[in-house]
Image: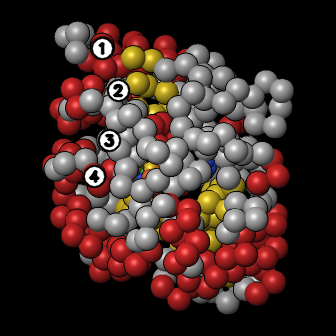
Amino acid sequence: MSRQLIDSFGRVHRDLRISVTDRCNFRCTYCMPAEGLDWVPRQELLTFEEIERAARLMVERYGVSSIRLTGGEPTVRAHLPVLVDMLAQLPVDLSMTTNATRLPTMAEDLKRAGLGRINISLDSLCKERFTELTLRDELSKVLDGVDAALAAGFDPVKINMVVMAGVNEEEIVDFARFGRDRGVTVRFIEFMPLDASEQWTEGHVVTQQQIVERINEVFPLKPVERTSAPATRFVYEDGQGEVGVVASVTQQFCDSCDRVRLTADGQFRNCLFAVDEFDLRSLLRSEASDDEVGEFLEKAVAGKWAGHGIGTVEFIRPARSMSQIGG
Ligand code: SAM
Ligand code: SF4
């Protein structure tokens, strides 16, 4: 490995998010329109071989060291453990973000195939609110999924809670307690303007400071020194675990961003909020050489902007919602 995926601001990119499908068995209201979306036709999805080729190139030639599978809901992609097995041959930290409903039947296969870590998205522990938020009455399946991930030996299991003002903010401390009791790390995520219904306003954001204050009142916290990871970490003073806060809105971490993305239909994105995409699928299907694909990736990363600019007049919403981009 001699080259890097580096942009004009000197940021080196080592973290790849791969969306393996845009389909989902949930309809989280902040992520997808209630009526659903037109799914990408199968022939437009990257095959496992195409995903593996792109990933291998980024790892072997450019030093990408972390790959996260996402979606849509990654576990609805048929034969997912086969892809996990292919990617697990690469020297990377391999993880997945999931709504967990299918983990009771899949967690062990995924572990065996070489998946390293799991993040589970869960925004309410209250059955009625959970059903309102996901348009599915499946809280118990998600909780079974959390247990299945732990039983399969995933460590750590992290829970991602998107905190929305006036929606689920009163559950912040309940989630902290849940994490402490179950031995899972909860990461609180500021609500971002990627909701399909375009209802987002700054007034919907519960800030990192507010989140930490609320937990701290009940379970005292102390900060851990920041790394380049997006989550700011805090440990409980009594030693019973930790929480993270992803403050994408109020404390943007664009300066240290090292992430690139590949959508299920093969579009390469140099930022979650990018308005332009790079058509990697066509290139992969054109019999391009690895050198040509590499050049394409280098150029796509080189042109990355300084930051997303949420809260400024320059901010432009990307045309695709989170379920299509991959969180
Ligand atoms: N289906 C999987 C899941 O829910 O974990 C993976 C895909 S989902 C798009 C990835 C993550 O994006 C989830 O944790 C979800 O909560 C988060 N997400 C979706 N829309 C969001 C928004 N508008 N603001 C912040 N996070 C969002
Ligand atoms: Fe599906 Fe995940 Fe989006 Fe919910 S957040 S609709 S589970 S892709």
Q: Residue 206 carries which label?
A: none
Kind of residue sitting beneath label 4: Val
Mark positioned earlier in the residue sequence (3 or 1) = 3
Depth order, front residue of 165/104: 165
In percent of width and height, residue 173 lies at 69, 80
Q: Residue 266 carries which label?
A: 2
Image side of residue 237 versus residue 31, left or right: right
In percent of width and height, residue 117 lies at 38, 62
Q: Do the residues labelled 1 and 4 touch (CB within 8 Å)?
A: no
In percent of width and height, residue 256 lies at 65, 39
Residue hosting label 3: 20
Instruction: Classify 10 Å Cα crowding around label 2: few (below 14), some (14-19), many (20 and above).
Output: many
Instruction: Classify 10 Å Cα crowding around label 1: few (below 14), some (14-19), many (20 and above).
Output: few
Report, in whole angstroms, how far the alpha carbon at label 2 lies from the one at label 3.
9 Å
Q: Is residue 293 above or below residue 18?
A: above
* Secondary-structure class at tag 3: loop
Depth check, mark 1 against mark 4: the one in front is 4
Q: Are marks 4 and 2 in contact (CB under 8 Å)?
A: no
Residue hosting label 4: 76
Instruction: Classify 10 Å Cα crowding around label 4: few (below 14), some (14-19), many (20 and above).
Output: some
Report, in whole angstroms, how far the alpha carbon at label 1 lies from the one at label 2.
8 Å
Depth check, mark 4 against mark 2: the one in front is 4
Q: Quarter holding the N terminus?
A: top left
Report, in whole angstroms, how far the alpha carbon at label 4 lies from the one at label 2.
18 Å
Residue hosting label 1: 282
Q: Which residue lies at the image location 53% right of the left edge and 32% below the top edge?
A: 320
